[in-house]
Amino acid sequence: MKRNQSKVPIPEKAAEITGNCAQVEIVGANFEEFDE
């Protein structure tokens, strides 16, 4: 069971990581606008 679980990718976790990265980029862009 452990081997199968490790081989199968988890789209939910991948989506969460991608979403977090996108949020960080958006926040960074907002800060840059405020600095200007």
Image (cartoon, rainbow, N blue to C red):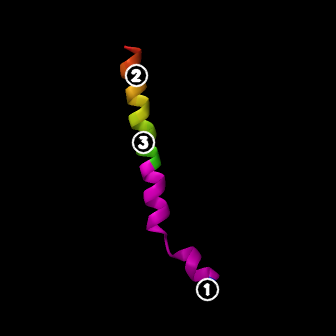
Q: Is residue 3 left or right of residue 27?
A: right
Residue 23 placement (x, y as % from top left): 42, 42
Residue 24 place in picture, x, y as percent: 46, 39
Q: Residue at x 61, y 81 (%)?
A: 3
Residue hosting label 1: 1
Residue at 49%, 70% in the rendered image: 9
Task: In the rendered view, tell whether residue 16 sits above or below residue 25.
Answer: below
Query: Callout 1, which amino acid?
Result: Met
Q: Amino acid at mark 2?
A: Glu
State the residue lying farthest toward the top. 36
Residue at mark 2 = 32
- Is residue 11 covered in magenta? yes
Above or below — where is 1 with respect to 7?
A: below
Number of residues whose C-alpha sits closer than 10 Å to that of mark 3, classed few (under 14), some (14–19) or many (20 or more): few
Q: Please tell me which residue lies in front, 10 or 3.
A: 10
Q: Is residue 7 above or below residue 1?
A: above
Q: Quadrant of the C terminus?
A: top left
Name the residue that disc number 3 marks: 23
Q: Which residues are magenta?
A: 2-19
Q: Which of marks 3 and 2 precedes in the sequence?
A: 3
- Disc 1 to disc 3, how far (Cα)? 35 Å
